[in-house]
Amino acid sequence: MEEKVPIPGSKRFRVTNRKVLATAIPMIFASTTTPLVGVVDAMIVGRFGDAALFGGLAAGAVVLDVIFVTFNFLRSGTCGLVAQCLGRGDAMEGRAVFLRAFVVAALSGLSLVLLAPLVATICEWLMNAEPTLTAAMDIYIRIRLISAPAVLINYAILGYFIGGGETGIALFLQLLLNGANIALSTVLGVYLDWGIAGVAWGTTFVEVASMIAGIFILVKRYRRMPRISFQHIFDSDAMRWLLHLNGDIMIRSFVLMGAYFLFTRQSAQLGTLTAAANAVLMHFLLFAECLIGGFATAAQQLVGRAIGAGDKTAFLRAVRVTIGWAFAVAGFASVLFVAFGDQLVIAITKAPDVRAEAVPYLPWAASTALSGGLAFHMNGVFIGATWSRDMRNVMLMSFAVYITALFAFGEMFGNHGLWAAYNVFLLVRGISLLWVMRRRVRTDFAA
Protein backbone atom coordinates (compact mmCIF):
# COMPACT_ATOMS: atom_id res chain seq x y z
CA MET A 1 0.00 0.00 0.00
CA GLU A 2 1.59 3.24 -1.13
CA GLU A 3 1.68 6.50 0.78
CA LYS A 4 -1.08 8.83 -0.41
CA VAL A 5 0.48 12.26 -0.95
CA PRO A 6 -0.35 15.09 -3.32
CA ILE A 7 1.57 15.31 -6.58
CA PRO A 8 4.46 17.75 -6.11
CA GLY A 9 3.40 21.24 -7.12
CA SER A 10 -0.28 20.32 -6.79
CA LYS A 11 -0.93 21.04 -3.12
CA ARG A 12 -4.36 22.64 -3.52
CA PHE A 13 -7.34 20.33 -3.29
CA ARG A 14 -11.11 20.50 -3.49
CA VAL A 15 -13.29 19.86 -0.45
CA THR A 16 -16.49 17.99 -1.30
CA ASN A 17 -19.35 16.45 0.62
CA ARG A 18 -18.07 13.09 -0.57
CA LYS A 19 -14.65 13.70 1.00
CA VAL A 20 -16.28 14.75 4.27
CA LEU A 21 -18.59 11.72 4.41
CA ALA A 22 -15.76 9.35 3.45
CA THR A 23 -13.97 10.39 6.65
CA ALA A 24 -16.94 11.01 8.94
CA ILE A 25 -19.02 7.86 8.39
CA PRO A 26 -16.29 5.33 9.26
CA MET A 27 -15.36 7.38 12.34
CA ILE A 28 -19.00 7.59 13.48
CA PHE A 29 -19.33 3.84 13.08
CA ALA A 30 -16.08 3.20 14.95
CA SER A 31 -16.87 5.58 17.82
CA THR A 32 -20.38 4.21 18.36
CA THR A 33 -19.00 0.67 18.75
CA THR A 34 -16.63 1.76 21.54
CA PRO A 35 -19.32 2.29 24.26
CA LEU A 36 -20.63 -1.17 23.41
CA VAL A 37 -17.45 -2.68 24.88
CA GLY A 38 -18.18 -1.13 28.28
CA VAL A 39 -21.78 -2.33 28.15
CA VAL A 40 -20.69 -5.90 27.37
CA ASP A 41 -18.06 -5.86 30.12
CA ALA A 42 -20.75 -4.74 32.58
CA MET A 43 -23.11 -7.48 31.36
CA ILE A 44 -20.40 -10.14 31.77
CA VAL A 45 -19.59 -9.13 35.34
CA GLY A 46 -23.29 -8.66 36.07
CA ARG A 47 -23.89 -12.35 35.33
CA PHE A 48 -22.06 -13.27 38.51
CA GLY A 49 -24.67 -11.45 40.62
CA ASP A 50 -22.01 -9.91 42.86
CA ALA A 51 -22.52 -6.18 43.49
CA ALA A 52 -18.93 -5.81 44.72
CA LEU A 53 -17.55 -7.18 41.45
CA PHE A 54 -19.81 -4.90 39.44
CA GLY A 55 -18.83 -1.89 41.55
CA GLY A 56 -15.14 -2.78 41.24
CA LEU A 57 -15.43 -2.95 37.44
CA ALA A 58 -17.26 0.40 37.30
CA ALA A 59 -14.72 2.12 39.57
CA GLY A 60 -11.75 0.62 37.74
CA ALA A 61 -13.17 1.61 34.36
CA VAL A 62 -13.56 5.22 35.50
CA VAL A 63 -9.95 5.32 36.73
CA LEU A 64 -8.65 3.95 33.42
CA ASP A 65 -10.84 6.33 31.42
CA VAL A 66 -9.32 9.25 33.32
CA ILE A 67 -5.78 7.96 32.74
CA PHE A 68 -6.13 7.08 29.07
CA VAL A 69 -8.21 10.12 28.09
CA THR A 70 -5.35 12.23 29.45
CA PHE A 71 -3.17 10.78 26.67
CA ASN A 72 -5.71 11.28 23.89
CA PHE A 73 -3.41 14.03 22.59
CA LEU A 74 -1.39 11.22 20.98
CA ARG A 75 -4.29 10.68 18.58
CA SER A 76 -5.40 14.30 18.17
CA GLY A 77 -1.97 15.89 17.89
CA THR A 78 -0.69 13.22 15.50
CA CYS A 79 -3.79 13.56 13.32
CA GLY A 80 -3.42 17.33 12.93
CA LEU A 81 0.31 17.27 12.21
CA VAL A 82 0.10 14.36 9.73
CA ALA A 83 -2.78 16.07 7.91
CA GLN A 84 -0.66 19.20 7.54
CA CYS A 85 2.21 17.11 6.16
CA LEU A 86 -0.23 15.63 3.64
CA GLY A 87 -1.21 19.15 2.58
CA ARG A 88 2.44 20.09 2.06
CA GLY A 89 3.17 16.87 0.21
CA ASP A 90 5.82 15.98 2.81
CA ALA A 91 5.40 12.21 3.36
CA MET A 92 8.81 11.95 5.07
CA GLU A 93 7.85 14.43 7.80
CA GLY A 94 4.49 12.65 8.20
CA ARG A 95 6.37 9.48 9.06
CA ALA A 96 8.62 11.40 11.43
CA VAL A 97 5.55 12.82 13.22
CA PHE A 98 4.24 9.32 13.79
CA LEU A 99 7.59 7.97 14.99
CA ARG A 100 7.91 10.83 17.50
CA ALA A 101 4.41 10.11 18.78
CA PHE A 102 5.25 6.39 18.90
CA VAL A 103 8.27 7.03 21.14
CA VAL A 104 6.25 9.30 23.47
CA ALA A 105 3.46 6.70 23.61
CA ALA A 106 5.83 3.80 24.33
CA LEU A 107 7.71 5.64 27.09
CA SER A 108 4.49 6.95 28.68
CA GLY A 109 2.91 3.49 28.53
CA LEU A 110 5.92 1.82 30.15
CA SER A 111 5.82 4.45 32.91
CA LEU A 112 2.16 3.57 33.56
CA VAL A 113 3.06 -0.13 33.76
CA LEU A 114 5.70 0.61 36.39
CA LEU A 115 3.32 2.89 38.29
CA ALA A 116 0.41 0.40 38.21
CA PRO A 117 0.81 -0.77 41.86
CA LEU A 118 0.97 2.84 43.07
CA VAL A 119 -2.08 3.83 40.98
CA ALA A 120 -4.07 0.87 42.32
CA THR A 121 -3.07 1.67 45.92
CA ILE A 122 -4.02 5.35 45.61
CA CYS A 123 -7.37 4.42 44.07
CA GLU A 124 -8.10 2.00 46.92
CA TRP A 125 -7.39 4.75 49.43
CA LEU A 126 -9.56 7.28 47.59
CA MET A 127 -12.46 4.84 47.19
CA ASN A 128 -12.40 3.79 50.87
CA ALA A 129 -14.99 1.14 50.00
CA GLU A 130 -15.63 -2.35 51.28
CA PRO A 131 -12.72 -4.82 50.83
CA THR A 132 -14.41 -6.98 48.17
CA LEU A 133 -15.10 -3.98 45.93
CA THR A 134 -11.60 -2.53 46.27
CA ALA A 135 -10.09 -5.98 45.64
CA ALA A 136 -12.04 -6.29 42.38
CA MET A 137 -11.04 -2.77 41.34
CA ASP A 138 -7.40 -3.51 42.18
CA ILE A 139 -7.36 -6.61 39.97
CA TYR A 140 -8.96 -4.78 37.06
CA ILE A 141 -6.65 -1.75 37.21
CA ARG A 142 -3.41 -3.74 37.60
CA ILE A 143 -4.18 -6.07 34.68
CA ARG A 144 -5.46 -3.35 32.35
CA LEU A 145 -2.44 -1.11 32.95
CA ILE A 146 -0.20 -3.87 31.58
CA SER A 147 -1.62 -2.93 28.17
CA ALA A 148 -0.88 0.80 28.62
CA PRO A 149 1.96 0.90 26.02
CA ALA A 150 -0.28 -0.81 23.47
CA VAL A 151 -3.23 1.50 24.24
CA LEU A 152 -1.15 4.64 23.78
CA ILE A 153 0.63 3.36 20.67
CA ASN A 154 -2.78 2.54 19.20
CA TYR A 155 -3.74 6.20 19.74
CA ALA A 156 -0.72 7.30 17.69
CA ILE A 157 -1.42 4.74 14.95
CA LEU A 158 -5.05 5.82 14.71
CA GLY A 159 -4.05 9.50 14.55
CA TYR A 160 -1.57 8.75 11.76
CA PHE A 161 -4.10 6.98 9.55
CA ILE A 162 -6.88 9.52 10.17
CA GLY A 163 -4.51 12.43 9.51
CA GLY A 164 -3.51 10.79 6.23
CA GLY A 165 -7.16 10.43 5.21
CA GLU A 166 -7.04 6.65 5.44
CA THR A 167 -10.13 6.14 7.56
CA GLY A 168 -10.75 2.68 6.10
CA ILE A 169 -7.65 1.35 7.87
CA ALA A 170 -8.56 3.29 11.02
CA LEU A 171 -12.05 1.75 10.98
CA PHE A 172 -10.61 -1.74 10.47
CA LEU A 173 -8.32 -1.37 13.48
CA GLN A 174 -11.15 -0.01 15.67
CA LEU A 175 -13.52 -2.81 14.68
CA LEU A 176 -10.77 -5.37 15.29
CA LEU A 177 -10.15 -3.87 18.72
CA ASN A 178 -13.78 -3.57 19.81
CA GLY A 179 -15.11 -6.75 18.22
CA ALA A 180 -12.30 -8.99 19.44
CA ASN A 181 -12.50 -7.35 22.88
CA ILE A 182 -16.15 -8.28 23.26
CA ALA A 183 -15.54 -11.86 22.09
CA LEU A 184 -12.41 -12.57 24.14
CA SER A 185 -13.70 -10.93 27.31
CA THR A 186 -16.83 -13.06 27.06
CA VAL A 187 -14.82 -16.27 26.61
CA LEU A 188 -12.37 -15.56 29.43
CA GLY A 189 -14.85 -13.97 31.81
CA VAL A 190 -17.84 -16.30 31.37
CA TYR A 191 -16.87 -19.57 29.69
CA LEU A 192 -13.52 -19.97 31.44
CA ASP A 193 -14.98 -18.45 34.61
CA TRP A 194 -12.11 -16.02 35.16
CA GLY A 195 -14.54 -13.33 36.31
CA ILE A 196 -13.37 -9.73 36.39
CA ALA A 197 -9.79 -10.83 35.73
CA GLY A 198 -10.97 -12.49 32.50
CA VAL A 199 -12.63 -9.25 31.36
CA ALA A 200 -9.43 -7.31 32.10
CA TRP A 201 -7.14 -9.86 30.40
CA GLY A 202 -9.44 -10.01 27.36
CA THR A 203 -9.12 -6.26 26.84
CA THR A 204 -5.37 -6.36 27.49
CA PHE A 205 -4.72 -9.12 24.94
CA VAL A 206 -6.82 -7.40 22.29
CA GLU A 207 -5.12 -4.01 22.76
CA VAL A 208 -1.77 -5.71 22.13
CA ALA A 209 -3.16 -7.59 19.10
CA SER A 210 -4.54 -4.37 17.62
CA MET A 211 -1.19 -2.65 18.13
CA ILE A 212 0.63 -5.50 16.37
CA ALA A 213 -1.83 -5.31 13.43
CA GLY A 214 -1.28 -1.56 13.10
CA ILE A 215 2.50 -1.83 13.30
CA PHE A 216 2.47 -4.65 10.73
CA ILE A 217 0.62 -2.43 8.25
CA LEU A 218 3.05 0.43 8.84
CA VAL A 219 6.21 -1.69 8.65
CA LYS A 220 5.04 -3.25 5.38
CA ARG A 221 4.48 0.24 4.00
CA TYR A 222 7.69 1.81 5.29
CA ARG A 223 9.86 -0.94 3.81
CA ARG A 224 9.17 0.43 0.33
CA MET A 225 9.93 4.02 1.30
CA PRO A 226 13.27 5.86 1.72
CA ARG A 227 14.91 5.51 5.11
CA ILE A 228 14.45 8.34 7.57
CA SER A 229 17.39 9.49 9.68
CA PHE A 230 17.49 9.43 13.46
CA GLN A 231 18.34 13.15 13.45
CA HIS A 232 15.22 13.92 11.42
CA ILE A 233 12.95 11.99 13.77
CA PHE A 234 14.35 13.56 16.93
CA ASP A 235 14.87 17.07 15.61
CA SER A 236 14.87 19.26 18.72
CA ASP A 237 12.53 21.94 17.34
CA ALA A 238 10.05 19.36 16.11
CA MET A 239 10.10 17.49 19.42
CA ARG A 240 9.64 20.73 21.34
CA TRP A 241 6.65 21.70 19.17
CA LEU A 242 5.13 18.22 19.59
CA LEU A 243 5.42 18.41 23.39
CA HIS A 244 4.00 21.95 23.41
CA LEU A 245 1.04 20.89 21.26
CA ASN A 246 0.40 17.79 23.33
CA GLY A 247 0.68 19.72 26.59
CA ASP A 248 -2.02 22.19 25.52
CA ILE A 249 -4.33 19.37 24.44
CA MET A 250 -3.70 17.54 27.73
CA ILE A 251 -4.62 20.63 29.78
CA ARG A 252 -7.79 21.01 27.72
CA SER A 253 -8.69 17.36 28.38
CA PHE A 254 -8.08 17.76 32.13
CA VAL A 255 -10.36 20.80 32.29
CA LEU A 256 -13.08 19.05 30.29
CA MET A 257 -12.94 16.09 32.66
CA GLY A 258 -13.09 18.53 35.57
CA ALA A 259 -16.29 20.04 34.17
CA TYR A 260 -17.89 16.61 33.96
CA PHE A 261 -16.69 15.72 37.47
CA LEU A 262 -18.18 18.93 38.92
CA PHE A 263 -21.50 18.22 37.20
CA THR A 264 -21.50 14.71 38.68
CA ARG A 265 -20.54 16.00 42.13
CA GLN A 266 -23.25 18.67 42.18
CA SER A 267 -25.76 16.09 40.98
CA ALA A 268 -24.85 13.88 43.95
CA GLN A 269 -25.38 16.85 46.29
CA LEU A 270 -29.03 16.85 45.16
CA GLY A 271 -29.44 13.20 46.10
CA THR A 272 -28.57 9.70 44.90
CA LEU A 273 -31.66 9.53 42.69
CA THR A 274 -30.79 12.78 40.91
CA ALA A 275 -27.20 11.63 40.41
CA ALA A 276 -28.40 8.34 38.89
CA ALA A 277 -30.90 10.14 36.62
CA ASN A 278 -28.25 12.58 35.38
CA ALA A 279 -25.84 9.70 34.72
CA VAL A 280 -28.51 8.12 32.50
CA LEU A 281 -29.19 11.40 30.68
CA MET A 282 -25.48 12.03 30.09
CA HIS A 283 -25.59 9.08 27.69
CA PHE A 284 -27.62 11.33 25.38
CA LEU A 285 -24.80 13.88 25.27
CA LEU A 286 -22.17 11.16 24.75
CA PHE A 287 -24.18 9.63 21.88
CA ALA A 288 -24.59 13.04 20.22
CA GLU A 289 -20.86 13.67 20.63
CA CYS A 290 -20.10 10.35 18.90
CA LEU A 291 -22.28 11.32 15.92
CA ILE A 292 -20.95 14.87 15.63
CA GLY A 293 -17.43 13.64 16.39
CA GLY A 294 -17.28 11.93 12.99
CA PHE A 295 -17.59 15.31 11.28
CA ALA A 296 -15.19 16.87 13.78
CA THR A 297 -12.68 14.20 12.71
CA ALA A 298 -13.34 15.07 9.06
CA ALA A 299 -12.68 18.72 9.97
CA GLN A 300 -9.40 17.71 11.65
CA GLN A 301 -8.16 15.97 8.54
CA LEU A 302 -9.34 18.46 5.90
CA VAL A 303 -8.48 21.59 7.87
CA GLY A 304 -5.02 20.22 8.70
CA ARG A 305 -4.46 19.42 5.03
CA ALA A 306 -5.60 22.92 4.00
CA ILE A 307 -3.28 24.54 6.57
CA GLY A 308 -0.38 22.46 5.29
CA ALA A 309 -1.14 23.47 1.70
CA GLY A 310 -1.66 27.12 2.64
CA ASP A 311 -5.04 26.91 0.88
CA LYS A 312 -7.48 29.40 2.43
CA THR A 313 -10.28 28.43 0.05
CA ALA A 314 -10.02 24.77 1.01
CA PHE A 315 -9.86 25.71 4.70
CA LEU A 316 -13.05 27.79 4.61
CA ARG A 317 -14.83 25.22 2.48
CA ALA A 318 -13.80 22.43 4.89
CA VAL A 319 -15.17 24.41 7.85
CA ARG A 320 -18.46 25.26 6.09
CA VAL A 321 -19.16 21.76 4.80
CA THR A 322 -18.29 19.93 8.01
CA ILE A 323 -20.18 22.40 10.20
CA GLY A 324 -23.25 22.02 7.99
CA TRP A 325 -23.20 18.24 8.42
CA ALA A 326 -22.43 18.56 12.14
CA PHE A 327 -25.49 20.71 12.79
CA ALA A 328 -27.68 18.52 10.60
CA VAL A 329 -26.69 15.52 12.69
CA ALA A 330 -27.08 17.52 15.93
CA GLY A 331 -30.60 18.51 14.92
CA PHE A 332 -31.44 14.91 14.07
CA ALA A 333 -30.11 13.75 17.43
CA SER A 334 -32.14 16.37 19.31
CA VAL A 335 -35.35 15.40 17.51
CA LEU A 336 -34.61 11.74 18.19
CA PHE A 337 -34.07 12.41 21.89
CA VAL A 338 -37.28 14.43 22.19
CA ALA A 339 -39.39 11.92 20.27
CA PHE A 340 -38.02 8.73 21.81
CA GLY A 341 -36.38 9.98 25.01
CA ASP A 342 -38.71 8.03 27.31
CA GLN A 343 -38.00 4.78 25.50
CA LEU A 344 -34.25 5.45 25.50
CA VAL A 345 -34.27 6.05 29.26
CA ILE A 346 -36.14 2.76 29.74
CA ALA A 347 -33.54 0.99 27.60
CA ILE A 348 -30.68 2.38 29.70
CA THR A 349 -32.06 1.73 33.20
CA LYS A 350 -34.52 -0.77 34.65
CA ALA A 351 -35.08 1.21 37.88
CA PRO A 352 -38.57 2.84 37.82
CA ASP A 353 -37.62 5.60 40.30
CA VAL A 354 -34.58 6.59 38.23
CA ARG A 355 -36.72 6.68 35.07
CA ALA A 356 -39.31 8.90 36.76
CA GLU A 357 -36.60 11.27 38.00
CA ALA A 358 -34.93 11.50 34.57
CA VAL A 359 -38.00 12.30 32.44
CA PRO A 360 -38.51 15.96 33.55
CA TYR A 361 -34.93 16.77 32.51
CA LEU A 362 -35.11 15.12 29.08
CA PRO A 363 -35.46 18.45 27.21
CA TRP A 364 -32.19 19.65 28.76
CA ALA A 365 -30.36 16.48 27.73
CA ALA A 366 -31.86 16.68 24.23
CA SER A 367 -30.70 20.29 23.85
CA THR A 368 -27.04 19.41 24.52
CA ALA A 369 -26.68 18.06 20.97
CA LEU A 370 -27.46 21.49 19.50
CA SER A 371 -25.76 23.59 22.19
CA GLY A 372 -22.64 21.40 21.97
CA GLY A 373 -22.58 20.94 18.20
CA LEU A 374 -20.44 23.99 17.51
CA ALA A 375 -18.03 23.20 20.36
CA PHE A 376 -17.51 19.59 19.21
CA HIS A 377 -16.99 20.71 15.61
CA MET A 378 -14.67 23.61 16.43
CA ASN A 379 -12.56 21.27 18.52
CA GLY A 380 -11.84 19.31 15.33
CA VAL A 381 -11.01 22.50 13.42
CA PHE A 382 -8.52 23.72 16.04
CA ILE A 383 -6.84 20.33 16.39
CA GLY A 384 -6.43 20.07 12.61
CA ALA A 385 -4.99 23.57 12.47
CA THR A 386 -2.85 22.83 15.59
CA TRP A 387 -4.08 26.03 17.23
CA SER A 388 -3.66 24.32 20.58
CA ARG A 389 -2.90 27.37 22.72
CA ASP A 390 -6.11 29.11 21.63
CA MET A 391 -8.10 25.94 22.24
CA ARG A 392 -6.61 25.61 25.73
CA ASN A 393 -7.28 29.26 26.60
CA VAL A 394 -10.88 29.12 25.41
CA MET A 395 -11.45 26.00 27.49
CA LEU A 396 -10.07 27.66 30.62
CA MET A 397 -12.23 30.75 30.07
CA SER A 398 -15.33 28.65 29.38
CA PHE A 399 -14.66 26.58 32.49
CA ALA A 400 -14.59 29.74 34.62
CA VAL A 401 -17.97 30.79 33.18
CA TYR A 402 -19.27 27.27 33.75
CA ILE A 403 -18.28 27.17 37.44
CA THR A 404 -20.03 30.50 38.02
CA ALA A 405 -23.18 29.34 36.24
CA LEU A 406 -23.13 25.90 37.88
CA PHE A 407 -23.17 27.14 41.44
CA ALA A 408 -25.45 30.13 40.78
CA PHE A 409 -28.06 28.25 38.72
CA GLY A 410 -27.79 25.11 40.85
CA GLU A 411 -28.55 27.10 43.97
CA MET A 412 -31.55 28.81 42.35
CA PHE A 413 -33.06 26.07 40.17
CA GLY A 414 -31.71 22.75 41.47
CA ASN A 415 -31.11 20.12 38.81
CA HIS A 416 -32.63 22.31 36.09
CA GLY A 417 -29.91 24.80 36.97
CA LEU A 418 -27.16 22.19 36.62
CA TRP A 419 -28.31 21.27 33.13
CA ALA A 420 -28.69 24.94 32.17
CA ALA A 421 -25.10 25.57 33.31
CA TYR A 422 -23.75 22.66 31.26
CA ASN A 423 -25.55 23.96 28.17
CA VAL A 424 -24.03 27.40 28.82
CA PHE A 425 -20.60 25.77 29.05
CA LEU A 426 -21.07 24.13 25.66
CA LEU A 427 -22.38 27.31 24.02
CA VAL A 428 -19.60 29.53 25.37
CA ARG A 429 -16.94 27.08 24.15
CA GLY A 430 -18.39 26.86 20.66
CA ILE A 431 -19.03 30.58 20.13
CA SER A 432 -15.64 31.57 21.57
CA LEU A 433 -13.77 29.11 19.35
CA LEU A 434 -15.66 30.37 16.29
CA TRP A 435 -14.70 33.97 17.13
CA VAL A 436 -11.04 33.02 17.63
CA MET A 437 -11.05 31.04 14.38
CA ARG A 438 -12.19 34.07 12.38
CA ARG A 439 -9.29 36.07 13.84
CA ARG A 440 -6.76 33.31 13.16
CA VAL A 441 -7.89 32.98 9.54
CA ARG A 442 -7.19 36.69 8.97
CA THR A 443 -3.66 36.39 10.37
CA ASP A 444 -2.59 32.88 9.25
CA PHE A 445 -3.69 33.37 5.64
CA ALA A 446 -2.70 37.05 5.45
CA ALA A 447 -0.22 36.38 2.66
Image: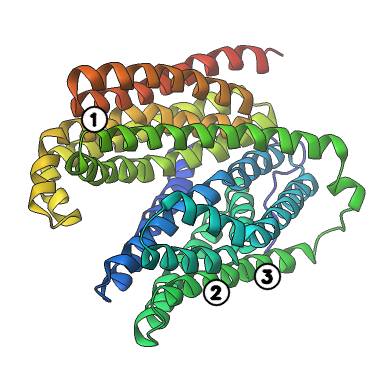
The local secondary structure at tag 1 comes to helix
All told, the count of numbered labels is 3
174 or 116, nearer to the observer: 116
Residue type at the position of mark 3: Phe
Residue 367 is marked as: 1
Binning the other alpha carbons within 10 Å of mark 2 as few (below 14), some (14 to 19) or many (20 upward) gives: some
Q: Which residue is mark 3?
A: 216
357 or 135, nearer to the observer: 135
Q: Are marks 3 and 1 in contact (CB under 8 Å)?
A: no
Q: Please identify, in this view, whether the residue under mark 1 or under mark 2 is nearer the observer.
A: 2
164 or 112, nearer to the observer: 112
Tell me, yes or no, if residue 13 can be seen here. Answer: no
Q: Which residue is mark 2?
A: 205
In primary-sequence order, the first of circles 2 and 3 is 2
- Structural distance between the alpha carbons of marks 2 and 3: 17 Å
Residue type at the position of mark 1: Ser
Left or right, residue 7 beside residue 398: right
Residue 100 vs 350, above or below: the answer is above
Residue at the image point whose x is 30% and y is 32% from the top: 266
Quarter-of-image position of residue 445: top right
Residue at the image point whose x is 27% and y is 66% from the top: 51
Q: Please identify, in this view, whether the residue under mark 3 or under mark 1 is nearer the observer.
A: 1
Quarter-of-image position of residue 109: bottom right
- Structural distance between the alpha carbons of marks 1 and 2: 39 Å
Left or right, residue 281 beside residue 130: left
Q: Please identify, in this view, whether the residue under mark 2 or under mark 3 is nearer the observer.
A: 2
User: Where's the N terminus, which quadrant?
Assistant: bottom right
Residue at the image point whose x is 77% and y is 43% from the top: 90
